[in-house]
Amino acid sequence: MKKETARTLRAFLIELAIYAVLVVGYFFLVLHFLGEGLHQLEARHRYTYAGVAILLIVGQAVVLENVTTLLLRMLRGRSE
Amino acid sequence: MFFPISGAHISPIYLVVIGFFIGILGGFFGVGGSFIAGPALRAVGLDWNFAVGTDLAHIVGKSVVAAKRHRALGNVDLKLGLIMAFGTIAGAEVGAQLIQMLKRAGNVNLVVSIVSIAVYLSISTFMIWESRKTLSQTRLPGGTVKGANAKHDPSAFKHVTSGIQRLKILPMITLPASGVTISLWIILLVAFVGGLFSGFLGGGAGYIRMPSMVYVLGVPTHLAVGTDLFEIIISASYGTFTHAVKGNVDILIALVMHTGAAIGAQIGAISTQYFTGPKIRLAFVPLPLIGAAIVIYTLMSGHKL
């Protein structure tokens, strides 16, 4: 295996491990604090729930994209 | 893990893994991946309506991540994406109405299945012919494919695409990012057809829109992938909203699934720079075939995956 490929693969695996720890913590946070609230909102205020659902998924996407970019920069020492 | 909105018990690891693989496909090919996500959610007992709505919500998040990454690589034509969003939403509404009409006529499953199999097989057959012919005729440059390099995208179908671009049906739209000047109506028609199939067959219909952008509009493959993802953000958000209002979205499942998709989408998007346009198109071929295989299976077995 080429040196460069091995380096990229190692960085990716470390990134994946750090990411997995963050995600597991996030599961408990989201499901514990948001689960019941969102359930009630979905049952009582459908339009508000629809708006909140889109905001949540877009917000999570932006945050996770920044987290993974940050991890890539930290591990590879350069901008992707 | 219990998800109170849909009342389903699903392993979060399963959702993350599914999201990861669909993320890679989405980032690389610019598709939503509903043909895998829908059956994957159904397979763990989620009701069909929740599977469709929740998948759309997850597609929004995944497309944000992948489109952001593609934008950094210079692969998103914002002007084209915004124009196409209008046609897609209109088409999706008409497609949904067609489904309602077929439901009333009582033969929705058979018609949708036959149409989808024909569409999937046609796309795959055409793309395998075109990409192989292009690869055999053209000497492609080495190195990474991004920015200006991505605009050099040879195609054996180019003569037809150039003919479509020459049609002077006013107003004409110039798309500097894609390097294309074309009639607004053709852009809207392509988007409308994509939306029609999205409403009619379900999912984001990226398997139709991405090839249409390349072969009909003449957009380079890398830009078609990135722009399609950007356009999917708008159209899938609209779909998510309408499904959520109808009670078909479990956003908690989508959020968990998206944690895997976020990293997969980045890997897929970054990988595109190591492949030329014709190679991406050739690699795209199995996707509609998988879709066709799933439909044939459901048709023959009677199971709705």
Image (spheres, coloured by chain):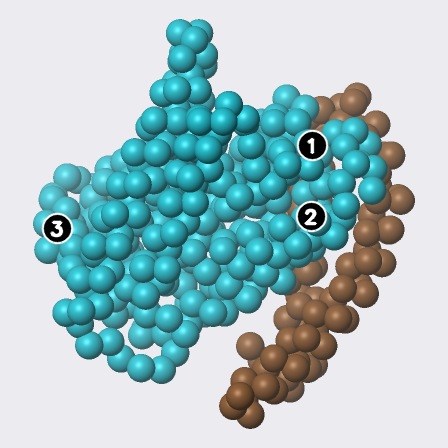
Chain colours: A brown, B cyan
Residue type at mark 3? Val
Badge 1 crowding class, 10 Å Cα cut-off, few under 14, some 14 to 19, many 20 or more, is: some
Residue B11 locus on image (x, y percent): 77, 45
User: Which residue is situated farthest in the right direction here?
Assistant: A32
Residue linked to disc 2: B15
Residue linked to disc 1: B45
Q: Earlier in the sequence, mark 1 or mark 2?
A: 2
Relative to residue A31, is residue B26 drawn left or right?
A: left
Spatial CA distance of label 1 from label 2 is 13 Å
Residue linked to disc 3: B160
- Whether A5 is drawn above or below B287: the answer is below
Q: Earlier in the sequence, mark 3 or mark 2?
A: 2
Looking at the image, which is closer to me, B262 or B40? Answer: B40
- Whether B250 is drawn above or below B217: the answer is above
Q: Secondary structure at mark 1?
A: loop
User: Which residue is situated farthest in the bottom direction here?
Assistant: A3
Q: Secondary structure at mark 2?
A: helix
Looking at the image, which is closer to me, B274 or B170? Answer: B274
Query: What is the quadrant of residue B265 in the picture?
Result: bottom right
Q: Earlier in the sequence, mark 1 or mark 3?
A: 1
Badge 2 crowding class, 10 Å Cα cut-off, few under 14, some 14 to 19, many 20 or more, is: many
Q: What residue is at 70 percent from the left and 81 percent from the top?
A: A74
Asked if the residues shown at circle 1 and circle 3 are in contact, with their CB atoms under 8 angstroms apart, the answer is: no
Tell us which disc is closer to us: 1 or 3. 1
Relative to residue A55, is residue B231 drawn left or right?
A: left
Spatial CA distance of label 1 from label 3 is 46 Å
Residue type at mark 2? Leu
Q: Secondary structure at mark 3?
A: helix
